[in-house]
Image: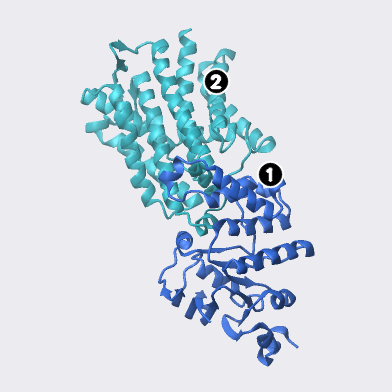
Chain colours: A cyan, B blue
């Protein structure tokens, strides 16, 4: 039972991250690799504020998205001139910078050792220290993110984002200042990712820089592509598959020294098969 | 004649080649102005500059006697300018209806976030789609339309913009005669509504039929300007453009 709740929590966290990635990459066509960076910023903000300043996780759940959003706003504004592959490289650069800072700013981040002992959330006299209780908070946050994602993709704003993905220059001609739209969705996506980061840090009670590398961003890409680019439901399904598959592999019982490698191989194989037979993903309607 | 759009010594060069070379033209208000010239004479480049698609190198552009030093594409809505593209540029993976709705709804991102589209927007969009015979196809993706229907949908976007100055870049190219008639009617309607239309076109029959004013370009320069019949009978135009 405990185990099921553990999976549900992971699902919620990755569901949030995949939705954020989908809004930016699938909905708007911004090929960002910075997903893991904002996820990491959320996690580190939680770790630092909770362990060094004694903030409660509930307060951090409010403040971390704002901090990540602010950073994303500044980063996004300075990346405004980049398009497509150049934007991708720039976001990769940002992820590298985040990683380097996390590894080297030892006063705050404790370097490569990471930060341990992050407290569990505490709410109305209850400590959510069991997966069974923590899952409630995780799913609650997931529901908020799902709701807002649907609101966005069903609004005029969301329609304009899709049009940016299709033909940004043409859309500008019709009176849209597209850079504002892109900046706004980049900021919203970062805020969502940070929520996932706070949940993760508080659930695992530990963060270190290696959790937020480019591998993590690629996993988010895989979720969005697997589920179906540009669809919220697709992102959730992608997260479901890529969280469940390693658990299934665990039950098959590969020797532990191969398990990790096998997982990578199966991810790779899945992506190749998908590109060959279902390039738009499981629920796919769109291409990038 | 009152001019809604003027250029003075307008220059656009690509790596030393003047695509538009010290061009000074006047576009009269509430009329259809034809823009003709051989391929590569700078017609599309001119339209790109006027719609803020690419900046001009030097010279001046006046909209209703107001100079605009830098034309930002998103300001087109404020200044009442819209255009079509020679290579049709639709929002391919969006429905036909959404292609029109996106032109009708709120532009400011914060407001757009809390708006889907009103009943009014929907009605406008459906009326436009009926005008261009695409109502039945409204839930299809724009990418699934035929070439002619795609051209029509671009015209639909122009109608949705409800702009004062409309720049058509070869709207008739490669179309079936019935569709050409339909678009001719739409263009004439726009004129009747008091819009100023610029029409890039190679078909002289259409030019003669629709245009009140004609501008002939060659190698980025102005060759002749004036009433279509008069311009088309000028020797210099016949020699350089029609090659007779």
The image shows residue B136, relative to residue A104, as above or below, that is: below
Q: Please give the residue where the numbered disc 1 appears in the rendered image.
A: B140
Name the residue at 36% across, 51% down.
A78
Q: What is the C-alpha distance between the residues marked 1 and 2? A: 35 Å
Looking at the rendered image, the disc whose residue lies closer to the viewer, 1 or 2, is: 1
Residue found at the far right of this picture: B177
Report whether A9 appears left or right of A249: left
Quadrant in the rendering for residue B221: bottom right
Q: Please give the residue where the numbered disc 2 appears in the rendered image.
A: A244
Name the residue at 45% across, 15% down.
A6
Q: Does the rendering let one see residue B164?
A: yes
Foreground residue, A227 or B110?
B110
Report whether A275 appears left or right of A48: right
Q: Which mark is residue A38?
A: none
* Callout 1 secondary element: loop
Instruction: Specify the subunit that label 2 lies on.
Output: A
Residue B75 location (% of width, % of height): 45, 61
Foreground residue, A267 or B182?
B182
Foreground residue, A8 or B4?
B4
Local crowd at mark 2 within 10 Å, few (<14), some, or many (≥20)? some
Instruction: Specify the subunit that label 1 lies on.
Output: B
Report whether B235 appears left or right of B14: right
* Callout 2 secondary element: helix
Residue A79 location (% of width, % of height): 40, 51
Name the residue at 58% across, 45% down.
B122
Foreground residue, A246 or B45?
B45
């Amino acid at each position: 039972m405990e185990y099921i709740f553990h999976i549900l929590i992971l699902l919620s966290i990755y569901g949030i991250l995949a939705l954020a990635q989908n809004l930016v990459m699938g909905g708007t066509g911004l090929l960002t690799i910075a997903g893991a960076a904002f996820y990491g910023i959320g996690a580190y903000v939680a770790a630092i504020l909770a362990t060094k300043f004694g903030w409660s996780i509930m307060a951090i759940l409010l403040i971390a998205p704002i901090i990540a959003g602010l950073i994303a706003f500044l980063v996004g504004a300075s990346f405004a001139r980049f398009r497509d592959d150049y934007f991708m490289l720039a976001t990769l650069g940002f992820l590298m910078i985040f990683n380097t800072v996390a590894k080297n700013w030892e006063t705050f981040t404790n370097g490569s050792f990471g930060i341990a002992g992050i407290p569990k959330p505490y709410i109305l006299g209850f400590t959510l220290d069991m997966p069974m209780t923590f899952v409630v908070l995780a799913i609650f946050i997931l529901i908020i993110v799902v709701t807002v994602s649907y609101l966005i993709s069903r609004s005029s704003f969301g329609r304009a984002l899709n049009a940016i993905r299709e033909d940004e220059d043409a859309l500008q001609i019709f009176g849209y200042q597209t850079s504002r739209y892109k900046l706004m969705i980049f900021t919203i996506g970062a805020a969502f990712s940070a929520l996932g980061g706070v949940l993760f840090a508080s659930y695992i009670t530990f963060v270190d820089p290696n959790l937020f590398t480019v591998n993590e961003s690629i996993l988010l890409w895989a979720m969005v592509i697997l589920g179906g680019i540009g669809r919220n439901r697709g992102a959730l399904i992608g997260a479901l598959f890529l969280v469940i598959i390693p658990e299934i592999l665990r039950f098959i019982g590969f020797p532990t020294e191969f398990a990790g490698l096998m997982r990578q191989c199966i991810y790779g194989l899945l992506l190749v098969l998908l590109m060959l037979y279902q390039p738009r993903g499981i629920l796919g309607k769109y291409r990038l | 004649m009152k001019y809604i759009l003027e250029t003075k010594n307008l220059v656009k060069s690509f790596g030393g080649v003047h695509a538009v070379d010290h061009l000074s033209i006047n576009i009269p208000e509430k009329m259809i102005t034809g823009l003709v010239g051989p391929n590569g004479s700078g017609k599309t480049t001119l339209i790109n500059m006027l719609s803020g698609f690419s900046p001009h190198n030097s010279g001046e552009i006046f909209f209703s006697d107001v100079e605009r030093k830098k034309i930002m594409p998103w300001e087109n809505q404020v200044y009442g300018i819209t255009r079509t593209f020679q290579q049709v540029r639709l929002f391919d993976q969006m429905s036909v209806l959404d292609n029109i709705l996106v032109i009708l709804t709120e532009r400011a991102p914060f407001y757009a976030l809390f708006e889907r589209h009103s009943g009014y927007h929907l009605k406008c969009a459906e009326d436009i789609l009926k005008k261009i015979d695409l109502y039945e196809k409204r839930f299809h993706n724009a990418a699934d339309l035929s070439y002619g229907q795609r051209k029509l949908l671009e015209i639909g976007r122009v109608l949705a913009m409800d702009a004062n100055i409309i720049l058509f870049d070869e709207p008739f190219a490669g179309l079936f005669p019935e569709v050409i008639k339909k678009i001719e009617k739409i263009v004439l309607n726009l004129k009747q509504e008091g819009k100023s239309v610029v029409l890039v076109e190679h078909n002289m029959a259409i030019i003669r039929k629709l245009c009140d004013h004609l501008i002939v370009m060659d190698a980025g320069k102005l060759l002749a300007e004036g009433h279509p019949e008069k311009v088309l009978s000028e020797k210099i135009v016949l020699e350089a453009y029609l090659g007779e």
